[in-house]
């Protein structure tokens, strides 16, 4: 092992192609140990491929770096042994009970006291009373909790979560993220892909990846500040008419409805002000300058991303 012990992942110039199409382009980044690092971006834009390269599960076509102090090219097998991977689709045995699934995983990884390890995990994740329930009969939230328990049972140093809370209710999502933060506080490094803005805001740092290109990264505050978006929140009548009229106008990079209001944003302040000027004179509309949200930035970045698979 080598490298800075405070850095879990340090990679430079990663590129990966499949079938002649570049899925990851010249990507460089660092991830601190014990941090929760979120990946955002359109579907099919290379997030999962990027995560798999970062932890040695895929070999890049070019580029170099380390994960957990190991070379991602030379030491992939050593990295894999320290990685827990929770996929979006529930992958445990549906016809085994909660306890049986956890005991099986514990034995698979050679834990000395498989029953004891399963018992402790059941207690930790609040699964007590459900030990003998079949995994296939669990609700989405409980399945998610069981899957998290299974992939952290062998005490990995790096946890990969691929859209882990898709289809899970808000209460279960919050409980899940509380557990993730507790694990990170104990030193576990977490890479997570998500489309939920509230989840992205719970990450220590985020990266926005669109069709293989890293467009933005840093803390949520950094990413919002670097977007340089000037944003207005508009309320009043005929907001749909306003949205249609402003879309595509000079300086207007984003027009998006948010409940009973409309967000209008752009990076060229002068051009934006010129385009909205006629509409600001309407008494039926109320314009208020506001700080851009992470979702504003996300939508604006999507708007200027080019789908390289078209």
Image (cartoon, rainbow, N blue to C red):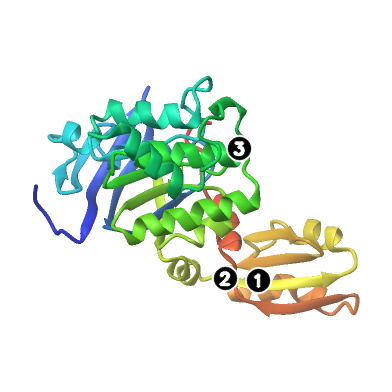
Query: Which residue is most to the left?
Result: 2
Spatial CA span between label 1 and label 2: 6 Å
Residue 140 has which mark?
3
Looking at the rendered image, the disc whose residue lies closer to the viewer, 3 or 1, is 3
- Residue at 59%, 70% in the rendered image: 292
Closest to the observer, 205 or 16: 205
Neighbour class for label 1 at 10 Å: few (<14), some, many (≥20)? many
Q: Quadrant of residue 79?
A: top left
Q: Which residue is mark 2?
A: 268
SS of the residue under disc 1: helix
Q: Which residue is mark 1?
A: 272
Measured as percent of width and height from the top left, residue 205 is found at 40, 61
Query: Can residue 161 be seen by looking at this rendering?
Result: no
Measured as percent of width and height from the top left, residue 126 is found at 51, 48
Measured as percent of width and height from the top left, residue 162 is found at 46, 40
Spatial CA span between label 2 and label 3: 44 Å
| 256 vs 291: above or below | above
Mark 1 and mark 3 in contact (Cβ < 8 Å)? Answer: no
Looking at the rendered image, the disc whose residue lies closer to the viewer, 2 or 3, is 3
Mark 2 and mark 1 in contact (Cβ < 8 Å)? Answer: yes
């Amino acid at each position: 092992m080598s490298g800075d012990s405070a850095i879990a992942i340090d990679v430079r110039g990663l590129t990966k192609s499949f079938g002649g199409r570049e899925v990851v382009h010249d990507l460089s980044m660092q991830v601190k140990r014990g941090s929760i690092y979120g990946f955002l971006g359109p579907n099919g834009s290379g997030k999962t491929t990027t995560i798999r390269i970062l932890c040695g599960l895929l070999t890049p076509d070019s580029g170099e770096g380390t994960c957990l102090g190991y070379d991602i090219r030379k030491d992939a097998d050593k990295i894999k042994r320290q990685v827990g991977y929770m996929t979006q689709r529930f992958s445990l045995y549906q016809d085994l009970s909660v306890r049986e699934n956890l005991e099986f995983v514990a034995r698979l990884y050679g834990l000395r006291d498989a029953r004891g390890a399963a018992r402790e995990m059941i207690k930790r994740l609040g699964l007590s009373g459900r030990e003998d329930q079949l995994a296939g009969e669990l609700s989405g939230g409980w399945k998610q909790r069981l899957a998290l328990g299974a992939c952290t049972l062998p005490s990995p140093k790096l946890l990969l979560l691929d859209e882990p809370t898709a289809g899970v209710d808000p209460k279960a999502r919050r409980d899940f993220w509380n557990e993730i933060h507790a694990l990170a506080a104990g030193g576990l490094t977490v890479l997570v892909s998500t489309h939920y803005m509230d989840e992205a805001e719970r990450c220590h740092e985020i990266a926005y990846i669109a069709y293989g290109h890293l467009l933005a990264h840093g803390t949520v505050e950094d990413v919002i500040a670097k977007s340089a978006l000037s944003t207005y929140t508009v309320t009043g009548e005929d907001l749909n008419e306003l949205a249609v009229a402003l879309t595509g106008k000079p300086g207007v990079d984003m027009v998006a409805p948010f409940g009973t209001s409309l967000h209008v944003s752009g990076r060229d302040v002068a051009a934006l002000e010129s385009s909205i000027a006629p509409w600001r004179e309407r008494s039926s509309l109320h314009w208020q300058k506001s700080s851009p949200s992470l979702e504003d930035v996300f939508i604006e970045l999507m708007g200027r991303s080019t789908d390289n698979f078209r």
